[in-house]
Image (cartoon, rainbow, N blue to C red):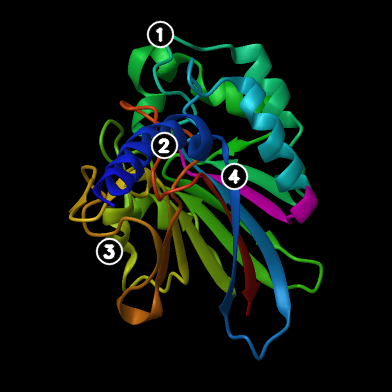
Amino acid sequence: MFKKIFIGLVLILVCIPIYAFKIEPSLAVVHRLQLGNKSMPKELKVLQLSDIQVSESYSTKRLDKVIRKVNKEKPDIIVFTGDLFDNYAQYNHEPEIIEKLKEMKATIGKYAVWGNHDYGGGAARVYQQVMNAANFEVLKNAGETLTLANGKKVFIGGLDDSLLGAPSIEETLSYRQRYDYSILLTHEPDVADGFVGTNTQLVLAGHSHGGQVRLPFYEVKNVLAKKYTRGLYELKDHTKLYVNTGLGTTAIHARLGVPPEISVFHLHF
């Protein structure tokens, strides 16, 4: 009896690292959410990606699965909430990254904001050029109002990175004109409270990796992602925040209980 228990424990201890380092990081789970006034027709399909963090552990080839899943969703808008690179000085592969990101299709447009890793390791020199070449508009304390086919207007704005950039909520919102729905992008989730009271319906963030490794009695939390870690939050004033757990990894290239995520929002307004 005790021998079987011992063998079982040994197998668990062996299998967990294999799963955490080799299996879960290679997944790409799609989470779909219905937001807004659900009595109203669906007006917009927004797909969020975050924290790709290309590296030796997350090569550009790993994006092929993500591209297939993204394009299968047929989104109106694709947003990327920062950290394209993990350490640009060690792994960059710009041409391959551009070609992969260009393969992601959206009927209206593709938007991105800066993450803290997009400033480090020399990445700040190339991040915007890489994203622009892949047909992403990079929003840096800026935004634009989109007019949909039915005449409704959606504002999409992006905040500069809150760790290494110069974020300004006031400047970002200064671009907002008359609108029916407002989406704000930020890399770090804990700054989302700054949008409460501004008539912002949805804030999308990343950065946290959802903790990346979830242990039974300990949760890993990142700076400016300590209050909001993963999933959907209802803030004050009916503002919603969604924290995407990202695709790649950083520091320790493992995931446990937090699979890579593609989030899809069906917006009703």
Q: Residue at x 47, y 72 (%)?
A: 201
The answer to whether the residues at label 1 and label 2 have Cβ atoms under 8 Å apart is no
Q: Is residue 40 above or below residue 26?
A: below
Question: Which of the two discs, 1 and 4, labels the residue nearer the N terminus?
Answer: 4
Q: Is residue 189 in view?
A: yes
What secondary structure is found at the residue carrying circle 2? helix
Magenta span has 80?
yes
Gap in Å between the C-alphas at discs 1 and 2? Answer: 33 Å
- Give the amino acid type for the residue marked by disc 1 in the picture: Ala
Percent of width and height locating residue 263? 57, 56
Gap in Å between the C-alphas at discs 1 and 4? Answer: 26 Å
Task: Give left or right: position of 85 versus 99.
Answer: left
Please state the extent of the stretch shown in magenta in the rendering: 72-82
Name the foreground residue: 171 vs 100: 100
The answer to whether the residues at label 2 and label 3 have Cβ atoms under 8 Å apart is no
> Dot 3: few (<14), some (14–19), or many (≥20) neighbours within 10 Å?
few
Q: Is residue 163 above or below residue 37?
A: above
- Give the amino acid type for the residue marked by disc 4 in the picture: Ala
Percent of width and height locating residue 132? 63, 28
Foreground disc of the pair 2, 3: 2
Question: Which of the two discs, 2 and 3, labels the residue nearer the N terminus?
Answer: 2
Residue linked to disc 4: 28
Question: Which of the two discs, 3 and 4, labels the residue nearer the N terminus?
Answer: 4
Residue linked to disc 1: 89
Q: Residue furthest left?
A: 217
Gap in Å between the C-alphas at discs 2 and 4? Answer: 20 Å
What secondary structure is found at the residue carrying circle 4? loop
Residue linked to disc 2: 15
